[in-house]
Amino acid sequence: MKVGVFATFMSPQATPKMIMDFGRRAENAGLESIWMGEHVALFDKNTYGYPGSKDGRIPVPEGGGMLDVTATFGFLAAATTKLRLGTGVALVPQRNPIYTAKEMCTLDWLSDGRIDFGIGVGWNKEEVEACGYRWEDRGKRCDEFLEVMRRLWTEPVVDFSGKWVKFATLRMDPKPIQKPHVPIIVGGYADAAFARAVKFGAGWYGFNLDPARAKTMLDKLDTAFAKAGRKRDSAYEIIITPPMNMAPDHVKQYADLGVHRLIPNLGSQRPDKIDQRLPEIENVVKLAA
């Protein structure tokens, strides 16, 4: 089982030097990948709370904000040589699909095939609407946008006529290094998310799941595969970010579930906290070997 790290870089701590040093330290520590969350804007009041915290708020430092994932991954790709870089997750329904396809295939090209495109529909209603889209149809829009991107990555010339996207004789080059295209890793726990994972995914990503809950979600994923007349094979990647307080013996439990990649959360990006947390994650690498 491979081990990476989830690190949503936030200002003011995430300076260029901090990001470069962290990327190199992660690579030298034997970590396989860095995954980064995405939010282009935050709001003082939200219709729905952030599911990853007890108070429903994203823990952003005072006066700070989340860095853009595309620009940050371009920076990290230049600072490292082996680390894979995964979006955890890119909020596809609020992104322009043509720009997103271009960004991801360019990142894949410049990183020599080290990009994983983790995707989800998002929880922040205000953010979706501020980006110019409707909240209620984000799932169906996500599926159409993924189809657009998949075709742009694999076909020399594309004509497309959907509900949200229409164009003719469109060319997009260079194509991704990875074949058939940048891997799509689908996140989410709703039935629609599992169906999306079966249709589009090279894998599924679960966040903040202990082994028991991970098993429950994998059972739902297998049900979705069965409904599609398919069976999940060993090449289909299961990627899990465990809770921050993961017990050491849980590493084997994740492995026994068939988890391919375990992505512990870095947490705080204060230098002293990183110095404390990275050895803990290095120990996970040893336990997973």
Image (cartoon, helix red, strand yellow):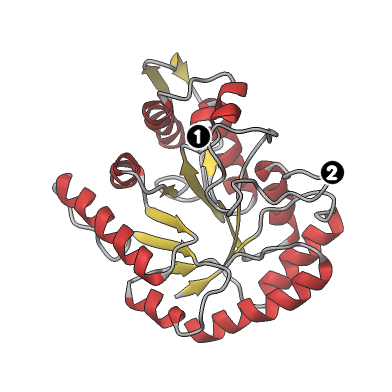
**x 52%, y 75%: residue:** 246
Q: Is residue 222 visible?
A: yes
Relative to residue 283, is residue 245 depicted above or below? above
Where does residue 174 sit, x and y in percent of width and height? 56, 37
Q: Which residue is mark 2?
A: 63
**x 45%, y 79%: residue:** 251
Q: CA distance from mark 2 to mark 1?
A: 27 Å
Where does residue 161 sit, x and y in percent of width and height? 37, 15
Q: Residues within 10 Å of mark 1 (few under 14, many from 20)?
A: many
* Label located before the other in sequence (2 or 1): 2
Q: Quadrant of the N terminus?
A: bottom left
Q: Which mark is residue 92?
A: 1
Where does residue 227 sit, x and y in percent of width and height? 16, 46
The type of residue carrying mark 2 is: Gly
**CB within 8 Å, label 2 to label 1:** no
Q: Nearer the viewer, residue 67 or 277?
A: 277
How many numbered marks, from 0 up? 2
Q: Residue furthest left?
A: 229
The type of residue carrying mark 1 is: Val
**x 58%, y 18%: residue:** 132
Where does residue 20 sit, x and y in percent of width and height? 79, 60
User: Tag 2's secondary structure?
Assistant: loop
- The quarter holding residue 228 reads top left
User: Tag 1's secondary structure?
Assistant: helix
**x 63%, y 53%: residue:** 111
Q: Residues within 10 Å of mark 2 (few under 14, many from 20)?
A: few
